[in-house]
Image (cartoon, rainbow, N blue to C red):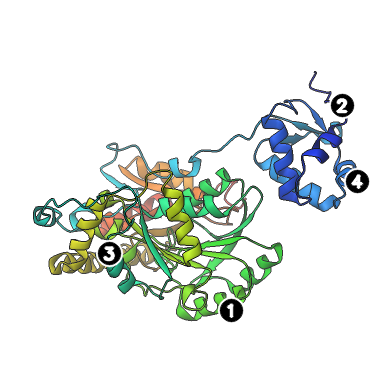
Amino acid sequence: MTAATAPPDVAALIVAAVEERSARGIAAAVSRLVSQGVLPPGARLPTVRQLATAVDAGATTVSEAWGQLGRLGVIEGRGRQGTFVTGPIRRPGPGRYRRLTAPAGRYRLDLSTGTPDVALLPDLAPVLARLDGTALTTSYLDRPVLPDLEDAVRARLPFPAEAVTVVDGALDALDRLASLHLRLGDRVLVENPAFPPLLDLLDLLGAEIVALPLDEAGIVPAALAGALDVDPVAVFLQPRSHNPTGTSMTVERARELAGLLAGRDVLVVEDDHSGAISGAEDVSLGVWLPDSTVHVTSFSKSYGPDLRLASVAGPAAVVDALVDRRLLGPGWSSRLLQAVLVELLDDPSATACVATAREVYAERRARVTAGLIERGVACGAGDGINLWVETPDEQATVVALASHGIAVAPGTPFVWAREPVDHVRVTVGLVATDHDRVAAALADAIGSVAPSSTANR
């Protein structure tokens, strides 16, 4: 078979494979045929109109299916020549995620990481010394969460969730929730900018991303209202200390967004990644939408990344499905680490340490922000350990700072649709000293960059 030919009656093959006459169903059918080798690379596909007639679906539906497959690299359009199979789905990797951080050890000040300052984390040694070594696991089918930890998590939740479990960090929670609830072609609402690994994950699952703009209070309600017309399956958001902007959702905004989502079959996934080091209130749509909201709380930034623990709270149907699926993988998160976290959450010195860290991060952010604003650099006040800084040309700014031994993260991996003005993300929570000198270096690097021809893409 040549690149210009196809198996006989391709439309009939697709029609026979289609189990659901929707864009997702058609895309899935073609994907299966390609993966099985029935439609090899180079096979020419029917036109949108031809397949719409054959499968008894609208031309718009087939066009959407072609768009989904094109974004996944399964097919490609060649103008008047037609549409051709390029190969099986090319599963993307963590492309955006890998672009964030600089190589370790190359910079005197690495502000690209988005990680907490280890000097501000509680000391684990006293807690570890108190653990008596009693067996915490007696069966592979034991409860996945220690009862004391579940009680501690519930006491800190912003709404009374029906079920609670613990997983290996916030990103593990996002991965498991997305994998359980999303299918090829599902439309998913995300903030813009958003957390790059989430965008990578949604790409991997073949979801169609609908990006929603933010203002100082969270997702813009009018944008959410308009996006609901495309029948999204889920919305992912960061309720406080948004990474990268530092935005925290207000109670009023949460109520307004919940009102728009009420009565719709949309899963709300909230990623409270900063947890206790955030200075903002822990706000959740779950107060109004408890049957469709899942609240993920990370303990990594406040108590230590090596704990690798985050809680998942929400409707029993959602949380129990996650727990059941984990039985076919890791089973549970280490109960030894859970016991450490229980001790930390109940320890006065650890609690005081976290409170001090919260204050220190706020002061560092405020001092660097003040230094930048004083020098005419636009950046949000916000909350958390990161700062979203405007620049005429992000790549040139990254290079200019690198020449002075400072690493920052480029803004593009965070943004689904390019903004008119480029940004860089600066982890100001790691600026322990010389705040004004760091602000001056950032401002000088930004000021030395002339707007590039790509700045307004």
**Residues at discs 4 and 3 in contact (Cβ within 8 Å):** no
Which element carries disc 3, helix, strand or loop? helix
Dot 3: within a 10 Å radius of its alpha carbon, few (fewer than 14), some, or many (20 or more) residues? few
- Which residue is disc 1 drawn over? 259
Q: Going 85% across and 31% down the picture, which residue do you hit? A: 81
Quadrant where the N terminus is found in the figure: top right
| Residue neighbourhood size for the residue with mark 4, other residues' Cα within 10 Å, grouped as few (<14), some (14–19), many (≥20) | some
- For the point 57% across and 56% down, which residue is it? 419
Is 164 left or right of 191, judged from the image as shown?
left
Determine which residue is flagged by label 3: 147
Distance (Cα) linking label 1 and label 4: 40 Å
Q: Position of residue 270 (x, y in %)?
A: 46, 64
Is tag 1's residue or tag 4's residue first in the polypeptide sequence?
Answer: 4
On the image, numbered disc 4 is attached to which residue? 53
Contact between labelled residues 2 and 3, with CB atoms less than 8 Å apart: no
Q: Amino acid at mark 2?
A: Pro
Q: Which mark is residue 8?
A: 2
Report the amino acid beneath label 4.
Answer: Thr
Callout in the foreground (4, 3): 3
Q: CA distance from mark 4 to mark 3?
A: 58 Å
Residue 224 placement (x, y as % from top left)? 62, 69
Foreground residue among 141 and 11: 141
Residue 351 x/y as whole percent: 19, 68
Amino acid at dot 1: Gly
SS category of the residue bearing label 2: loop
